[in-house]
């Protein structure tokens, strides 16, 4: 049996870092994203009233932006009524309903701009928009019980089924940007209608086998995950968001059908990512060219693409693998993402966003590019309020409004505690209550009612822990039979290495504490050149851990060494002539970088062994 | 008074590394370059008989390619007669003479392809070709006494003077690619005619002040060294070959006129290069975009542009600065280039060439680019026989045929020994004889006749030396009054650092011995990932120095450490879990990399202090 996730609606998070992130989203981010989407014409686009020459010309992916926002807003409505949010959503649904085609088609771009060309250009995000609208409709239905939007999208899904699976009358066979697969599995679960499972499976199975979809160059087949059929895939390839949306759908496939072949592919692909293609922050996608995975161990810090959406997609995929295989390693990656590579996409103010989440900012390189018109491309250095392609902000909305999905799961009467936050859940006779200030400390108390056993994840980063009672280790979980257990993870400041095959990190060390990856910014360190800092392998031992209200996660101070410029003007000299000084390096949680103006930032420092 | 260079024609090099390089050029490279230029149509282009549809369509810079070859071949003729070389050169001169325009114009491209458009497009290398033809004509005249070619080029120079300086009737005021400036100073020295000095000075002074030359974007002004007038320039900017040809001409200006303002600019620019913009190999030009200097301390190893021609241009500039200022630091840079960043442009076989001379080859990145169609650009990994833009090979011809220029200089009756090679010179009553196996050892014996003092350069890399007699140190030279002196430089294997501001080298060490920079190739080290190697700061002490016939410079073996991949499949882990092994690292002279097939190569290794 698979694990059954306890949904966010049944889960309480009462405090701590994840609570804070969810609260910021509710208080600021959801409204900010809506306002930007309103100002840019994305919301109004659904009215299908745009005329040539007006601002706000509909764009092929705008439907998906608003859909993700509706999905996120719906998760908030699931917890508490909000008349304003409801009115905004209902207004969009009014527009969608009014402009749905006779045959069920919904798309604000094609309806207004080129209705004669629907389903002709694979790369135009049509089914991607459809998928996000389906997810939004399901979320709104599950949150409010209102089924108007759901019925609209079921009619559209029925059209897609006829056009693509039955008639093959579109100009392409599978979507250019995956998403609809996940949405159809979800629609199946929400409605119980087998036809949606059939269509979801069709899109997964068909991928990589349809002549109509094949472009001219092999690398494009990899870019779009169609180099091999899903059942033969063993590595993560191509556009990292599309890839992980597809892999998440493959995991859904395995979850819903028990298909062992698909599960084998999922497992191999996931390990290819986690062991060879994932940044220490959990971020994925090593290059801006194709926004893509590249080759194993290619993880450059400064030019990292690591799109916020790709991190979210990997969390989706990992969470499904956790349900499928009950192995704590999957939840480790979810945790890595939640505390680092996803949340870095949002400003502390809650209204600005990163698309890319690099692991280094070296302003000298940015200056060089400006000064020389070099064609190198580096991520932007400051979060912005909205992007032309603004997929990440509403993705943040929906993720942060549903963080409760990731905390607990059950298998019969056995409870799994996958992430650590104060709170609990009650569902079907099972209850759990958790007390913790994690990750400020590593102490977690779990009390359960009605449970046979409780499985407490022992994080992959944890080298030692103490438990209140007897347990056995199973798949990365400490399994207890007691109904009141306390686990305390030792959480030292730890100097870490990448596997040496990660060539960009050769000779470099980073700092973590528990699930939190640290970085330094130049401004906290007297403007020092961060590349001049040497991080001693033993510097974690005496590091100061400083609680920090501004970041919600501790800041660190540790003893390090900095190399000084040569005073005699030599560019090259014997190493015996190099001069160093002892310094205190101030570090902050990685996710909080770039919140205080443009600055140098570094995660991987030159290492000093000894 | 300036130093007076003892020319290659008066200088003997009897053995050692420089002799070997010159011999390879004479025996193989000069012929190989001619043959490639013949096959590609470059030689035949001078006949101006090409017809549309035929192969070998003349190209705007082809004249300069053949001119540089003639210059190099002439230097060989200066030392010994060679009927075949002479016949080849005379045949080209026949063609040039037959196709010179009535008014003196010479250019195989414009004459055949678009005669109506001469002097209209600044970027079309017209004056650059003219300059190289002038240098070739002077070299051939000085080598053979034959003045036919010289007279042809004097007529062309007279035309250029009229069009550009007197009439201002061209569409631009100064050359898009500098070179003619240096050539005109040379023509002035060869002929004694002041008009050529006037024109040379005009082109230098006019640069950066002519409205007709200014393109739309400021960065282009820097790219072409016209952001400020020469007299105000203080930093090296833009296209590195054009820049250093221009700076060399500025130094000629100062040498010929004693102009202190120009000398101030030269000094500042040279130090900007040597202290902030030069690779440890002497290479310059940090980016392929614009083939250009970028910003201070931007010296990436793998994407280094470091064009062979740019290294040669920096040697020209440095040598002139040495004559101007009598400071050994300038000769240090010439040496750095001769043993490393220039000679790396030529294969051991003598017939293949690098345009770019990177300091790292990491084939994984090349594979990545192929696999993903990433738009990153890296240097090629194997030398080739000819380039589309084949400026470097004939530049190698002329440099290696005139290495004798760089060894000795005189100031009245004082002799300067600037580079170390067995041999000597006799000129104007002064004689020197040098015995040395430099740089196999650091022992150099210099005997002089007729000299007042002898100045022996103490190389910048040298931390300690012994001398046979009394000396005083002056401008980096040990100055002796004896006529028979022996100096012995200690020449340990030395682990070096870049100034910490070179961010690409942060935490990294390299290895040198005397003037020679070392690299490692994976093939010499059991296929080991060179990025996994940690170079201990003390590893020079017990290094084995192994004489090597194949490279003509010693190879090294030294004790290092290599990090091993994690066996448990973890991508990130505490540094305490990293595993290492002791290894013997085999290193070869940098210049000899990539002579045994495609391979990883590294100069700057992760450093291990302690």
Image: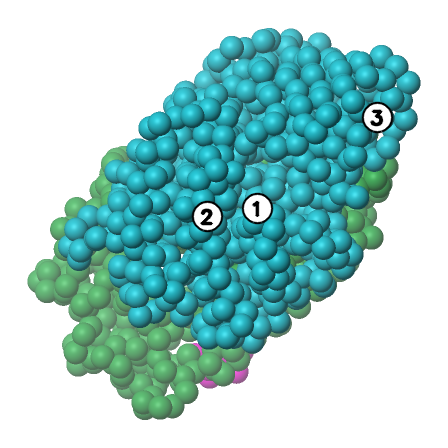
Chain colours: A green, B cyan
Q: Is residue B196 left or right of residue A146?
A: right
Q: Residue at x 34, y 69 (%)?
A: B117
For mark 1, give the secondary structure. Answer: helix
| Magenta part of the chain | A81-89
Tag count: 3
Mark 2 near mark 1, Cβ–Cβ under 8 Å?
A: yes
- Whether residue A23 is visible: no
Q: Residues within 10 Å of mark 3 (few under 14, many from 20)?
A: many
Percent coordinates x, y for residue A34 in the rendering = 50, 77
Q: CA distance from mark 3 to mark 1?
A: 29 Å
Q: Does the magenta run of residues contain B417?
A: no
Chain where mark 2 sits: B
Q: Residues within 10 Å of mark 1 (few under 14, many from 20)?
A: some
Residue B339 occupies quadrant:
top right
Q: Residue at x 55, y 61 (%)?
A: B224
Quadrant (top left/top right/bottom left/bottom right) for the C terminus of chain B:
top right
Percent coordinates x, y for residue A88 in the rendering = 46, 82
In this figure, which residue is indicated by the disc labeled 3? B453
In this figure, which residue is indicated by the disc labeled 2? B150
Residue A177 occupies quadrant:
bottom left
**Marks 2 and 1, the one that precedes in the sequence:** 2
Quadrant (top left/top right/bottom left/bottom right) for the N terminus of chain B:
top right
Q: CA distance from mark 3 to mark 2?
A: 38 Å
């Amino acid at each position: 049996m698979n694990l059954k996730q306890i949904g966010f609606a049944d889960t309480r998070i009462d405090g701590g870092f994840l609570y804070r992130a969810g609260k910021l989203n509710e208080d600021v981010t959801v409204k900010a994203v809506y306002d930007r989407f309103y100002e840019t014409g994305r919301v109004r686009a659904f009215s299908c009233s745009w005329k040539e020459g007006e601002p706000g010309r509909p764009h092929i992916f705008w439907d998906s932006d608003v859909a993700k926002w509706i999905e996120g807003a719906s998760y908030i409505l699931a917890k508490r009524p909000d008349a304003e949010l409801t009115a905004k959503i209902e207004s969009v649904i009014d527009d969608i309903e009014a402009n749905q085609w006779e045959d069920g088609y919904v798309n604000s771009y094609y309806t207004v701009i080129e209705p004669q060309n629907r389903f002709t250009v694979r790369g135009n995000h049509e089914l991607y928009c459809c998928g996000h609208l389906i997810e939004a409709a399901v979320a709104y239905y599950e949150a409010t019980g209102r089924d108007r939007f759901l019925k609209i999208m079921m009619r559209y899904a029925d059209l897609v089924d006829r056009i693509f699976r039955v008639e093959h009358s579109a100009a392409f066979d599978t979507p250019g940007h995956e998403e609809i697969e996940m949405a159809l599995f979800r629609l199946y679960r929400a409605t119980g209608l087998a036809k949606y499972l059939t269509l979801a499976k069709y899109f997964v199975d068909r991928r990589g086998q349809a002549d109509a979809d094949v472009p001219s160059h092999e690398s494009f087949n990899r870019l779009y995950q169609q180099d091999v059929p899903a059942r033969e895939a063993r590595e993560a390839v191509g556009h990292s968001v599309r890839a992980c949306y597809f892999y998440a759908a493959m995991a859904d496939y395995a979850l819903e059908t028990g298909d062992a072949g698909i599960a084998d592919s999922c497992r191999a692909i996931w390990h290819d990512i986690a062991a060879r293609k994932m940044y220490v922050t959990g971020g994925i996608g090593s290059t801006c060219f194709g926004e893509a995975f590249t080759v194993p161990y290619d993880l450059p810090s400064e030019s990292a693409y690591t799109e916020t959406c790709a991190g979210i997609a990997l969390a989706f995929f990992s969470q499904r693998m956790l349900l499928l295989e009950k192995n704590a390693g999957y939840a480790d990656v979810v945790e890595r993402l939640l505390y680092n590579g996803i949340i870095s996409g949002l400003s502390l103010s809650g209204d600005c966003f990163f698309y890319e989440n690099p692991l280094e900012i070296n302003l000298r390189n940015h200056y060089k590019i400006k000064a020389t018109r070099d064609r190198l491309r580096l991520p932007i250095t400051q979060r912005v309020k909205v992007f032309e392609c603004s997929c990440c902000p509403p993705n943040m909305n929906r993720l942060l409004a549903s963080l409760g999905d990731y905390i607990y799961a059950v298998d019969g009467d056995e409870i799994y505690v996958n992430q650590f936050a104060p709170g609990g859940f009650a569902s079907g006779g099972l209850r759990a209550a958790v007390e913790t200030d994690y990750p400020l400390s590593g102490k977690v108390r779990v009390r359960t009612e009605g449970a046979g056993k409780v499985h407490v994840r022992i994080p992959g980063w944890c080298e030692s822990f103490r438990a209140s009672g007897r347990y056995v280790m199973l798949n990365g979980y400490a399994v207890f039979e007691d109904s009141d257990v306390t686990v305390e993870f030792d959480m030292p400041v730890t100097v870490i290495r990448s596997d040496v095959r990660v060539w960009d990190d050769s000779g470099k060390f980073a700092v973590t504490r528990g699930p939190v990856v640290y970085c330094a910014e130049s401004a906290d360190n007297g403007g020092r050149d961060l590349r001049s800092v040497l991080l001693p392998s033993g510097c974690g031992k005496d590091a100061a851990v400083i609680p920090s209200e501004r970041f919600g996660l501790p800041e660190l101070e540790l003893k390090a060494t900095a190399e000084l410029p040569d005073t005699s003007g030599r560019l090259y000299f014997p190493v015996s002539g190099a001069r160093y000084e002892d310094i205190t390096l101030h570090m902050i949680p990685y996710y909080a970088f770039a919140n205080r103006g443009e600055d140098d930032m570094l995660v991987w420092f030159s290492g000093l062994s000894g």
